Each structure stands twice: as C-alpha cells, then as structure tokens.
Image (tube, coloured by chain):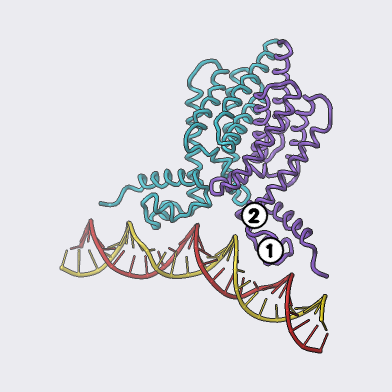
Chain colours: A cyan, B purple, C red, D yellow
DNA sequence: TAGCCTAGAGAACGGACGTTCTCAGCGCCA
DNA sequence: TGGCGCTGAGAACGTCCGTTCTCTAGGCTA
C-alpha cells in the first residue's frame, strides 16, 4: 500500500490544523501535536508544507473560501436586496451558536501574529477587504451608497468580536437589527430624493 | 543611592511592558527583552511581579483604567446625551490616528491568549462588559432602550477591529455616522410614543 | 575597619518548539 | 534474490523562553 495519496493527506492535515489552531491558537499548537492528531509522520508533514508559516497560510486560505461560501449561501436565499444583506447577520447568528465558536479566525490570528508576521497581517487585510467589497456590491444593488456598506461591515466585525469575547450569540441579533435600521434609514432618504 | 524606589521601577516596567506587548504581541516579548528595555535586573523584575502572567494582568488593568479615562473624558465634554454618545466615536478617531495604533489591546490579547489562558479571557470579558454597561447608562440618559446600547457597543468594537486590520482610521467616522443614525432612529420612534 | 545584607549581572536549568537527521524496515524492479 | 529508494518513527539539534541560582561588588551598621 503506497500510503494514502498526497492530496488526501494534505486535506487531513489542513483540517486537523484548522481545528487545533482555531481552538487553541496557532503558537500553542506545535508541529508535533499536529503530527499526532493527523496521524502523519513529521517527514511527510514537511514534504507537504515547507514550514509552519506556509501551513498557516493555507489554513487561512481555506477559511477564506469557507467564509465566502457561507456568505454566498446566505445571500443566495434570494428576496429583496435588503433581505439578502440581512441574511448575512442570520448566518452569523447560526455560526455564533455553534459549540466550538471562538470568534473570527482572521481577527484572532491578526491579534496573535499580525504584529510579527506581515504576510499573515496582509492575508487578514485582504480577507476583510474582500468581504467589504462584497457587502458594497450588495448595498449597491439595494441602491445604497458606499458609506452604508462600510457601516454594515463594521457591524459584522463588531458582532464577531463581541460574540467571541462575551461567549454569547446575541450580538448577531443586535447587529441585524442595527443593520435593518441603517438600511431603511438610507433607503428612505434616497427614496425621497 | 538605594536604587530607585520600588514604585517608580514598577511604573517603569509596566510602561515598557505595555509598549512592547502592544507593539509586538505578548508572546513575542520575553522577560529578557523587558529587562533590557526597562533597565532593570531580572531579579528585581521577579521581585516586583511573581510571573509573566501577573505582569500581563497588571498591564491589562492599567489599559482598562486608561480606556475608562478616555471614555470619561470624551463623555465629559457635555452637550446633549446624543452628543456625549457620539463623542466616544470622536475619541476613537483620534486614537486610530495615532502612529502606533495597532487595534484594541483587549481584542488582540483575546486572540493571542484567550484560548489558553482563561484568567486573561475573563479580564477581557470584564473590560468589554464594563464598557457596554457605561454605554447603556449613557443611552438610558438619552432615553433610549438597552438594545440601542448593544448596537452602539458593537459599532465601537467593529470600528476598532476594522481600523486595526485595515490600517486606516476611517472606520471611526463611519461608526459615528451609523451611531447617529441609530440614535436618531430610536429617539424619533420613542418621541412619537 | 569588619561583617552583613542587598543588588545587579548574567549563567544555568528545564522545557518547548521548529526543523533536520538517523536508522531500521519494506516494496519494487533487474 | 539482491540492492535501491522511499517510508515512518522518533531521536537529535539549535534556539528561545520563563524562572531560578551563583557570584561578585558595594554600602551600611557596629
């Protein structure tokens, strides 16, 4: 048996790394813990990923795609542009309620490594910029101005941070309510133009 | 000369630790770097603080008092309750514009140590709860409901996170605008009751 | 002046971590 | 069958960190 195909092992390692990093923090999870949990030899680990930093970057890349998928799934529910924007906060509420929720990976990673690892800080910045751009697109479809998109993105960030630290999911509902108020306020104003 | 008084050295160490921890992250700053920067012997360091964790807790305690002072100073500018609430976001804008701004210490520390050090996670939670309570008090004085206070607090958190990651200070202005909209929306609604 | 207490400088210790190396075992092809 | 190359297991290496220990020098008291 030629061991498992590289791609399968890669996925396994990335999945395990994502779970452990998210639960305990990146610096707290050594390559050896990863090896043990994933059932892979250290040699193979370093064949697949040249260094821990490369591995971390791939984990973040996967998280980014996962996040984008969640956003698109929420937005795809259809309805009015207003509904589609608010669906993002409903998605947040479901996420916050998961047992192992511990905040936004990117915010946590920025706090842990942003100061010492510029590459990682850049990845986090790109991810957040991408989300902001998506929100701006949805806001534009709703006929709202870019400033509303900024406000809605800030609400989403604040909800994630607040839910993580407080350990409760209620922030999602409050953010949703605030978003609805902001959207309606702006659309009412433009409607009267 | 009996060396400097303990209290003076304590302050010096705490000031240096705060600066280095904020700039580089806590785990990235060893006790030896602290010793070098503060010009104190390791012996004295461990006489003043029994462990690194105790030192970190004191640094966070000082940051909490500093933050509370900034909030009170902003709020003390007077004006209507609405003005006093919005003054918090003006304070944020000034803070974000400082050269060495790198986000909220508590959010960063939660991301770095929250998963592994429950005591520190607790301190962060307490700090954020205290801020929320203060906002709730100001909202109550403005005649608004507790839900508005939640929304305003989420905006403040989101602004801090967004400004830190993006490296720009514009989030404060957007958060302020959103806060004004939310406040006016609620007060208009209660005014019609 | 003699002895003692304290402080500072830095070595030392124990452990953790990222990364590399060794070595024994096993499949594969000539 | 015999050797080659790859594999996994884990030891080893170099470094760093939190914490403690040692040693030396100097000032204060008697």
Indicate the quadrant where residue A131 lies. top right
The answer to whether one can see residue B174 in this image is: no
Q: Look at mark 2 in the image and give the residue it sits on.
A: B54
Classed neighbour count for the residue bearing mark 1: other residues with Cα under 10 Å, few (<14), some (14–19), many (≥20)? few
Q: Secondary structure at mark 1?
A: helix
Q: Which mark is residue B20?
A: none
Specify whether B79 is left or right of A63. right
Please give the name of the residue rendered at 67% of the width and 18% of the height, measured from the top-left corner.
A186
Indicate the quadrant where residue B66 lies. top right
Do circles 1 and 2 both sit on a common chain? Answer: yes
> Image height check: is D18 above or below A23?
below
Q: Look at mark 1 in the image and give the residue it sits on.
A: B47
- Parent chain of label 1: B
Which one is in front, B161 or C1? Answer: C1
Give the mark, 1 or 2, whose residue is nearer the N terminus: 1
Which one is in front, A123 or A95? Answer: A95
Specify whether C16 is left or right of B102. left
Please give the name of the residue rendered at 67% of the width and 61% of the height, measured from the top-left corner.
B33
Please give the name of the residue rendered at 62% of the width and 29% of the height, measured from the top-left corner.
A155
Counting from the top left corner in percent of width and height, residue B113 is at 58, 48
Counting from the top left corner in percent of width and height, residue B164 is at 66, 41
- Parent chain of label 2: B
> Image height check: is A49 above or below D4?
above
Please give the name of the residue rendered at 71% of the width and 14% of the height, measured from the top-left corner.
B190
> Image height check: is A175 above or below B30?
above
């Amino acid at each position: 048996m030629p061991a498992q195909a590289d791609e399968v092992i890669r996925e396994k390692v990335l999945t395990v790394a994502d779970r452990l990093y998210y639960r305990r923090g990146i610096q707290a999870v050594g390559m050896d813990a990863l090896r043990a949990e994933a059932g892979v030899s250290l040699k193979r680990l370093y064949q697949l990923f040249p260094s821990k930093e490369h591995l971390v970057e791939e984990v973040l890349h996967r998280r980014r795609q996962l996040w984008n998928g969640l956003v698109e799934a929420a937005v795809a529910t259809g309805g009015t542009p207003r509904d589609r924007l608010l669906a993002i906060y409903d998605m947040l509420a479901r996420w916050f309620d998961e047992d192992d929720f511990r905040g936004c990976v990117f915010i946590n990673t920025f706090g842990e490594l942003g100061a010492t690892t510029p590459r990682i800080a850049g990845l986090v910045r790109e991810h957040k910029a991408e989300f902001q751009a998506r929100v701006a697109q949805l806001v534009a479809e709703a006929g709202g101005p870019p400033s509303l998109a900024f406000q809605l993105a800030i609400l989403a960030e604040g909800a994630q941070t607040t839910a993580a630290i407080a350990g409760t999911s209620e922030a999602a509902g409050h953010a949703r309510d605030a978003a609805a108020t902001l959207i309606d306020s702006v659309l009412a104003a433009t409607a009267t133009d």
